[in-house]
Amino acid sequence: MNARLSIIAACAGAALAVTGCSGGAAPSTQTAAPTTTTTTQPAGDPVKWAGAFCSGTTPVLTGAVELVTIAAANSDNPAALKEGMLKVLDAGSKSLAEAEKKLKEVGAPGPEAKALHDEMVKMFGDGAKEYVTVAEQVKKIDANAPDFLGQVEKLGGESADPSKLSEQIKKLDSDPKYKDAIAKAPECTEMRQKLGKLIGQ
């Protein structure tokens, strides 16, 4: 479990590095989406889209970093560790589900972004469900069991892996259109500030 938590902290640091570098992005020069047919869905606002992504990502990454602190402070107090984990999982599931909803409402920021948009929606939706499932499994584990940490370490899957969110941030940052949107979205600024405070950057 300690190794996994260390990886989570590293992911948060990577996310901060990317969003921190995006503050000086050049003004967007994108053009309006074509509206030649009535069947084409209007392109979503890239800034709102990036904001939805960051609003869902922030509680997950900050919660993961907080979990590192909780684990370190309660290495000899499984009950407190269990309680802290459940709080992080609850906040994470809600933020992921809300991000999925917001992304659907905003829509893909252009036809060329449809595949990426669908990937993000699925990632947040699957992640929210996985957090709920893991929380239910954690609740069933006896905190006083000798192998409590061992049982906890086996829980979870890849859908809600914080490293996936970090990878997506890097992917968005590599595209000038999304890098600019991340720089302009208030939710992404908030993510950068919160992560910075948590990991001391």
Image (spheres, grey):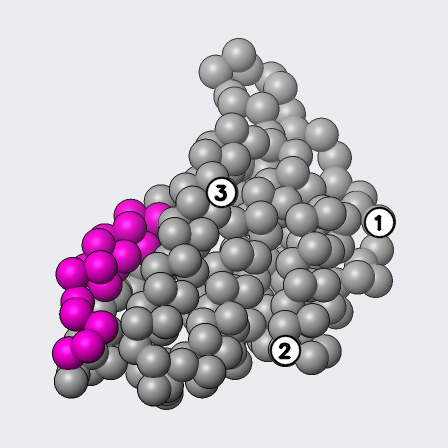
Mark nearer the N terminus (2 vs 1):
1
Describe the element under mark 3 as helix, strand or loop: helix
Q: Which residues are magenta?
A: 126-145
Q: Nearer the viewer, residue 81 or 22?
A: 81
Name which residue lies at 73% across and 68% down: 20
CA gap between label 3 and label 1 equals 25 Å
Which residue appears farthest toward the top when viewing the image? 38
Establish if 164 lies above or below 180. below
Q: Nearer the viewer, mark 2 or mark 1?
A: 2
Can you identify the residue that label 1 sits on?
27
Q: Residues within 10 Å of mark 1 (few under 14, many from 20)?
A: few
Q: Residues within 10 Å of mark 2 (few under 14, many from 20)?
A: some
Given the image, on which type of amino acid does mark 1 rest? Pro
Which quarter shows the C terminus?
bottom right
**Image coordinates for residue 155, horizontal then vertical, percent:** 22, 69
Is 133 one of the magenta-colored residues? yes
Name which residue lies at 58% across and 24% down: 42
**Image coordinates for residue 57, horizontal then vertical, percent:** 52, 55
Given the image, on which type of amino acid does mark 3 rest? Ala
Describe the element under mark 2 as helix, strand or loop: helix
Given the image, on which type of amino acid does mark 2 rest? Ile
Establish if 189 lies above or below 74. above
Establish if 25 lies above or below 6. above
Can you identify the residue that label 3 sits on?
99
- Predominant SS of the magenta segment: helix
Can you identify the residue that label 2 sits on?
199
